[in-house]
Amino acid sequence: MNLVIDIGNTFAKTAVTDRGEIVSKNVAQELSCPAIRDMLRAYPDIDRAILSTTRHPDKTTEDYLRQQVAQFMRFEPGTPVPLANLYATPQTLGADRLAAAVGAWEVAPGRELLIIDLGSAITIDRVSAAGEYLGGNISPGMAMRFEALHRLTDRLPLCVAPSEAAVLTGNTTRQAIESGVVLGIIHEIEGYIARLGEKNSALTVFFTGRDANFFADKVKKPIFVSNDLVIKGLNRILEYNAPSNIPDIET
């Protein structure tokens, strides 16, 4: 069994996988040694672990993991992955972006892929049908857009995702902000899908991230929604690098 840890800007996600299937998940603001201990006690067959983080590495946690599992690896820019990475600056590529691409490829191999991660930031990433990670773009996520409008102006209120459908013409300031942010993201996403779809009509689109479900029914093209793409990708990367019959890997 594998322990997969994805520490993002906002949350730390942990998952236990068995033969590629997720059998347990947990989300917290921080990852702690007691939380890891409890998971290892609940699943004593865990013998491999992978950790990916967008924060500064926590040596205490990593040392504890190395002591507790037979094979441990930290996912870093130089870690081999089952995709050809064509990014010009791989050392600056967010681990979550590449892991999500690997996860999407695991679900839909041999297809032209567009992976849209709707989290703190919105990342748009592409994988070719030949299994090449091509790169993508980054823009502010929904909460970040609301926060920026409030903090960088004197009078605009802090808004959140509206419970009602966005309108083309808001008739209050709050409605204008809510609809402006939501429709702006929808038009952004549909613009990418339309332009890339012109070159490849078989484009397969994945949504993942915190706001994936919110936008899933607001985009015209059929999409796959998976909140576990990064976890699936990290699990595949672990298995790609650490077959069960080799010793501990330090990357």
Image (cartoon, rainbow, N blue to C red):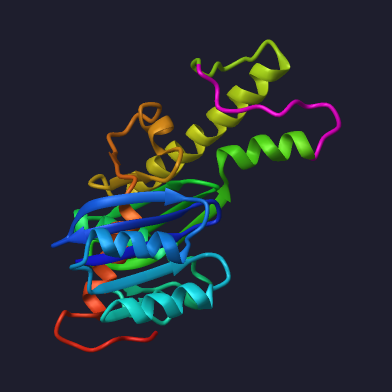
- 176 shown above or below 5: above
Q: Residue at x 78, y 38 (%)?
A: 151
Rendered location of residue 33, percent (x, y): 45, 66
Q: Residue at x 19, y 66 (%)?
A: 1
The single residue placed furthest to the right in the displayed view is 154
- Counting the numbered discs, the total is 0
With 116 as the anchor, is 40 left or right in this view? Answer: left
Q: Quadrant of residue 134?
A: bottom left
Q: Main secondary structure of the magenta part?
A: loop
Rendered location of residue 243, percent (x, y): 18, 80
Q: Residue at x 36, y 50 (%)?
A: 26
Q: Considering depth in this image, is 177 or 235 the residue closer to the camera?
A: 235
- 44 shown above or below 220: below
Image quarter where the C terminus lies is: bottom left
With 41 as the anchor, is 210 left or right in this view? Answer: right
Q: Considering depth in this image, is 246 or 157 the residue closer to the camera?
A: 246
Rendered location of residue 193, percent (x, y): 38, 42
Q: Considering depth in this image, is 10 or 43 the residue closer to the camera?
A: 43
Residue 240 inside the magenta-drawn segment: no
Rendered location of residue 10, percent (x, y): 54, 51
With 231 as the anchor, is 214 left or right in this view? Answer: right
Q: Is residue 125 visible?
A: yes
Q: Quadrant of residue 146?
A: top right
Residue 159 inside the magenta-drawn segment: yes
Q: Residue at x 24, y 67 (%)?
A: 2
Q: Which residues are magenta?
A: 152-163
Q: Quadrant of residue 105?
A: bottom left
